[in-house]
Image: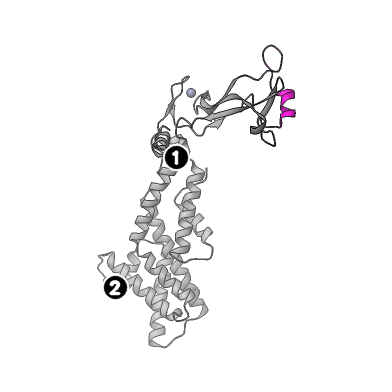
Amino acid sequence: MLKKFKMLQASSVKKKKIKCPLCSVKFIPRFFHLEKSKFEVSAPVHIVNKFKFKSSNGGFQPPNIVSRSWVTICPECKYVIKFAAEIGKKEYLDEDSRSILHFREFKENGKHYEYKFHNLDKPYREAHYYNTDLIGELKQRILKVLDDLVLPDWGFLYKMWKIDSQIDSFKFLIRFLSHLEKYIESLKITIDLDTTIAKIGALYIPYEIKENIINLIRIREKAVVQYYDLSEKDEKLLQKTYIELAMELIFQEMASLHLNKANIKEDPRALDKEFYYLELKELLQNYVKNTLYIREETSHFVITMLNRLKITLG
Ligand SMILES: [Zn+2]
């Protein structure tokens, strides 16, 4: 029974727009704040009694009922709109029920009282609910397109190179290029010159990355044919190419989602850009760290990507 009651209460918060009584604009409330009560009792009784309660007849007489409101503001005309939030009833306290600190208590004609409050939920869903829903739905779409990419396999390989002494730079180079060639094949690029190098040239990625991949293929040839050992410079190139190519592929998938155009359809003004930015940043950072196993400068890569996607804080 209690559970049913709670469910009813939760659903009583309306996910719909407020209509401003002054300018008639319909909007999602940014937030409700609790109006400060004129009769707020938050200090011990001896302080409260002196100045808090002043009735119309000039004496100090606390009213029997006090109330507070949920307050929000129309984003268009700035009209202040109020809804009932809290109703406090004056109740007599006998010696046993008085608290040690006397918080919320007051004295009237030598007797002790306090207000017992009954709270009401915020009457409408605030913008945060809409923002959370939006980001939740987008996160699922983002993770889906990223999972469809080949990156988790590459990330696993890269991780092995970084943590497993069995996978040295040579092995990583061979396996990474083999993954990459499979990926290029899967794109089914049709060009006259049917070679891997030509297909790399036809990839829709920055020129510098193409050049780096081709350099890695040459290093592989040398290493296999001439028993050439990879230098530190080669290893750096290998790492750089992996990171830059992976980031480029993520960028392209993300760009296809048009994330900079995402909005809250009920009320575009309700989009919390900062929240949106920070949530996407966190999602990407986790992906880059945990799936791609890129542990250096993750924040830099992700911020650069968000800039390219035109997703901003403000
Ligand atoms: Zn208004």
Q: Residue at x 65, y 31 (%)?
A: 104
**Camera-nearest residue between 267 and 192:** 267
Q: What range is drawn magenta here?
A: 41-57
Circle 2 is placed at which residue position?
A: 195
Colour pattern of the rendering: one colour
Q: Residues within 10 Å of mark 1 (few under 14, many from 20)?
A: few
Q: Is residue 1 above or below residue 294?
A: above
**Camera-nearest residue between 133 and 247:** 133
Q: Residue at x 51, y 77 (%)?
A: 233
**Magenta-span inclusion, residue 51:** yes
Percent of width and height locating residue 21: 46, 20
- The disc placed on residue 173 is none
Percent of width and height locating residue 114: 63, 27
Circle 1 is placed at which residue position?
A: 129
**Camera-nearest residue between 72 and 5:** 5
Q: Is residue 285 above or below residue 67?
A: below
Left or right placement of residue 159 versus residue 191 in this view? right
Q: Residue at x 35, y 72 (%)?
A: 179
Mark 2 secondary-structure assignment = loop
Q: Is residue 119 above or below residue 193?
A: above
Mark 2 vs mark 1, CA separation in Å: 52 Å
Residue 35 seen anywhere in this rendered image of the structure: no
